[in-house]
Amino acid sequence: MARKKKICMLGATGVGKTSLVARFVHSIFSDAYRTTVGVTIDKTHVCVGGHEVDLVMWDLSGEDEFQSVQLAYLRGAAGYLLVADGTRRETVTTALSLQEAAVRVVGNIPLVLVLNKADASASWDIDEDLEKQLREKKWTLVKTSAKTGDGVEGAFTALTHAMLAADGLVQDDEGRR
Amino acid sequence: MIEGAGILTALDILVLERHEGPWFVPRGELPPWCDSLAKGTIVRDVPFLASDVFPFFALFISDAEGTWAGQGSARLDSGGFTQVVDGGAELHLVATALRVLEADKTLSLLVVAENERIFREERTMLQRARELRFAHDALSREVEQKEVLAHCIVHDLRNPLSSILGALALLEKQSLPASDAKLVEVALRAANRQDELIREILAVFAAEHDPAVVAGEAPRADVCAVVLQIANVLAPKARARRVELLPRIHISHGDTLVAGDELRLFRVIGNLVQNALKYSPAAAVVRITVDDDTEGGGSILVGVEDSGTGVPAALLPHLFRKFARAGDGTPGTGLGLYFCRITIERWGGTIGYEPRPEGGSRFWFRLPKRRGIPRPV
């Protein structure tokens, strides 16, 4: 029987949280921006390290001046993807402050830091210094493109792996970091 | 069985009666929107695990426990949520936990309704606001990139100009025929003017892209030292125009430090004094005053007064904006006062203009004082 794990998508507005879920679960991508209101819940099934896992994905509305993230929705989550837009440096700052807020709600549960829109290399806004600072946090960092699909499965798999490792079901794989 | 469940069903509402723990029993007819859920997941009068079908309820049920236990309000609304159903379609729902007294029984109910219209309105509004924000941010980034490009171009223009200035300065020292010497003089004056314009543009760029000063971290400048330096440097220019340049300092030495750095403060006061000289008639007086600010406590007030024609009324609303020009044919970039404003404001100060009752202009700015020991003047 598959284990059920709740995961959350957390990040600033327009970083591509919904697109990452759509790419991962339904293998689709749309260039048109469609804002998330409140929370959208989707499900999928994965197999990581020989373990069957039902992922229940809570895609939370982005943080901006128009709407605050409802961090209470994090309750019961086993992990989360912390998503930033690699072409907008300021979304990394938002992600970092959301992470601090998330720790206050759910403690130090597994997370994967995702720098999305990696296909837009011409407007990439994350320099080596910032990337180095982020890597020093010892979180798994994955560059993704919901548009091309690059890194998307890797990000969700890394999070699932980290959640299973937190349960002692697989070995914590430092090499992923 | 719930009395009136049929009414709720007619309203397209799914009524769930709590069975035990997270198990609920659907009562009445199922609303049509339930058809989009996986077949057989909800069957009338058959208990089912609500959080399996609606994962959102994993949280909401625990929030609603108090309501069902009779603590606090008899109803609790969930707020809207979206559930992706088979095929990727979205179901926009809202739930309400109710405690209802029916006959001699208390019912714990979970009422689920489609939230399509309100959801769409809210999404349209949010989407529009966010799209505008993205468009604004993208435009700002583009403008910034173009400004950086323009800055690089202007900066690069200075390199060959330095060589031209050096060559002309050497040429000027040669014993040239009078007509040639005159040409060199004209060329040197034009090249110096161009160099000054480029410096002004670069100074504006630097001021625009400086981060705003954080209180307590601002650099310090000795305002009196800067004023006296300017009076010295511009004295020949004033004499050439037969204008008297008078610094008037009314604060004691030791209390003369303000927020700002001296190079830029020199440029700010220098701009104001040069404007005053430019617009002053012959035999006039230009005063640079430095006073303790009586209005803004803890500030120093600097004024530059002339007896020129004053600022035309039409220019007043735009006086400190970029490219504001008097339109009287006087040469300039229209960046000088703009530079003064953004520089003073970044240091936490204010700047302004007022006509003098006796005629002429008075430009002023105030800057917060800083503690420290000023260098000897």
Image (cartoon, coloured by chain):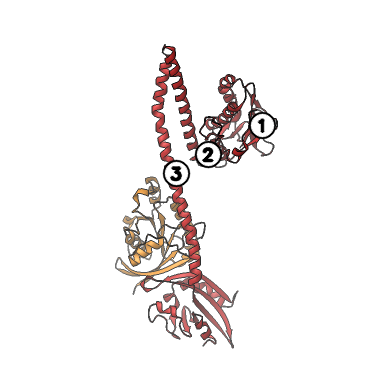
What residue is disc 1 on?
B291
Chain letter, colour red in render: B
**Residue B373 in sight here:** no
Residue B343 lies, with reference to residue A126, above or below; the image says above
Chain letter of disc 2?
B
Which residue appears at 33% of the width and 75% of the height? A1
* Mark 3, other Cα within 10 Å: few <14 / some 14–19 / many ≥20: few
Relative depth, front residue between B264 and B151: B151
What residue is disc 3 on?
B144
- 1 vs 3, front mark: 3
**Residue A87 in sight here:** yes
Relative depth, front residue between B33 and B14: B33
| Chain A, chosen colour in render | orange
Which residue appears at 35% of the width and 48% of the height? A122
Q: In the structure shown, which secondary structural element does the residue marked by tag 2 occupy?
A: loop
**Identity, as a three-letter code, of the amino acid under mark 3:** Glu
Side of A23 where B17 appears, left or right: right
Residue B294 coordinates in the image, percent (x, y)? 69, 36
- Labelled disc at residue A59: none
What residue is disc 2 on?
B322
Q: In the structure shown, which secondary structural element does the residue marked by tag 1 occupy?
A: strand
Corner quadrant of residue B247: top right
**Identity, as a three-letter code, of the amino acid under mark 2:** Lys
